[in-house]
Image (tube, helix red, strand yellow):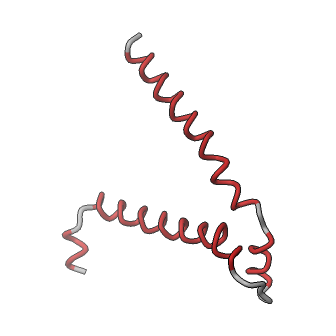
């Protein structure tokens, strides 16, 4: 536990957030892509994930909205800065 005292608290939080984000990304990637490529399963949870098409379209359809939102955020910050 001595090595834990030498790590900065910001780095510890950063590693925690990166690891949680990575776990969620791998889980989403399995649900959206990998489960559709697997043969039909007898496990009820995997079978339900294979038949579900909501999440495989959710992120690709959300990306254009995020781009527009980021652009408007940038635009309003520029207008506020020069006002």
Q: Is residue 20 left or right of residue 6?
A: right
Q: Is residue 16 above or below residue 10?
A: below
Q: Nearer the viewer, residue 78 or 20?
A: 78
Q: Is residue 78 above or below residue 2?
A: above
**Can you tell which quarter of the image residue 42 is in?**
bottom right
Q: Is residue 60 above or below residue 45?
A: above
Q: Residue at x 38, y 17 (%)?
A: 81
**Can you tell which quarter of the image residue 26 is in?**
bottom right
Q: Nearer the viewer, residue 24 or 42?
A: 42
Instruction: Name the image quarter holding the N terminus.
Output: bottom left
Where residue 59 appears, as percent x and y from the top left, is 63, 54
Q: Is residue 63 left or right of residue 10?
A: right
Where residue 28 appears, as percent x and y from the top left, is 61, 66
Where residue 13 appears, as percent x and y from the top left, is 36, 61
Instruction: Name the image quarter holding the C terminus.
Output: top left
Where residue 73 appears, as percent x and y from the top left, is 50, 29
Q: Nearer the viewer, residue 45 or 33?
A: 33
Q: Residue at x 20, y 79 (%)?
A: 2
Q: Residue at x 64, y 47 (%)?
A: 62
Q: Nearer the viewer, residue 14 or 29?
A: 29
Q: Residue at x 54, y 65 (%)?
A: 25
């Amino acid at each position: 536990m001595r090595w834990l005292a030498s790590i900065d608290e910001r780095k510890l939080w950063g590693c925690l957030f990166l690891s949680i984000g990575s776990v969620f990304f791998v889980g989403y990637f399995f649900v959206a892509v990998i489960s559709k490529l697997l043969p039909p399963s007898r496990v009820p949870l995997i079978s339900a994930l294979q038949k579900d098409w909501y999440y495989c379209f959710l992120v690709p359809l959300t990306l254009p909205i995020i781009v527009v939102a980021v652009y408007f955020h940038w635009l309003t910050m520029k207008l506020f800065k020069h006002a």
